[in-house]
Amino acid sequence: MSNKTVQSLFHYKRWADGELLDAIATLDAPQYGEAHHTCLRIFNHIHVVDAIFKANLLGKTHGFAATNTPETPTLTALRNAVTELDNWLVDYAATLSPPEGATQLSFRFVDGDKGQMSRDEMLLHLVTHGGYHRGAIGRIMVQCGITPPRDTLTTFLHRSEPARQR
């Protein structure tokens, strides 16, 4: 995978995360309390996995015992944490050389199992993992009468580079 593609994927991820967080903000928490809570729990899971893999990429311990936290953050706190980590991932992707991306790293999953992936594979996992769970949040929103954002890569590319539509 080229560095330009990796960079584009993390600009896309940052955009898609922001779009969905904006949409969750429109979900009436008093009326749809359980759905709102579930959306936050799922999005927090995305964020925790991102944080775990950031630590893996850096060869550091992450301090998580599970792929979600016991407490559910507020939407504001979650948005701040997601934005900060998405910005870090965009910057990280911009500095990653092809040899660094291909480098295999060993790590432990939160259940204690050993794992090994290249940096590129870890980054691709974050993009696909987040997309999968954003889709689940979108289905919950539909059930509450809210149309979720169209957070596909094609939508992002054409909105961020309108010349592609010519």
Image: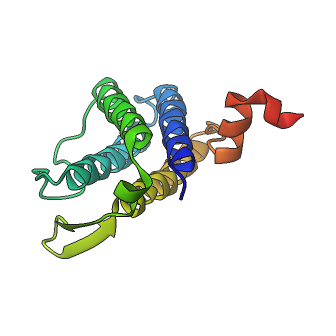
| Total count of labels | 0
Residue 79 coordinates in the image, percent (x, y): 36, 28
| Image quadrant assignment for residue 100 | bottom left
Residue 159 coordinates in the image, percent (x, y): 71, 30
Horizontal relation, residue 153 to residue 25: left or right:
right
- Which of the image's four quarters has the C terminus? top right
Residue 108 coordinates in the image, percent (x, y): 16, 67
Q: Residue furthest right?
A: 166
Residue 1, placed above or below residue 16: below
According to the image, what is the colour scheme of the structure?
rainbow
For the point 49% across and 47% down, the residue is 137
Question: Does the rendering let one see residue 107?
Answer: yes
Residue 154, placed above or below residue 22: below
Residue 28, placed above or below residue 137: above
Residue 39 coordinates in the image, percent (x, y): 41, 43
Residue 151, placed above or below residue 107: above
Horizontal relation, residue 71 to residue 9: left or right:
left
Residue 64 or 68: which is nearer the viewer? Answer: 64
For the point 61% across and 45% down, the residue is 142
Question: Does the rendering let one see residue 68?
Answer: no
Residue 12 or 73: which is nearer the viewer? Answer: 12
For the point 62% across and 38% down, the residue is 145
For the point 54% across and 53% down, the residue is 2
Residue 24 or 59: which is nearer the viewer? Answer: 59
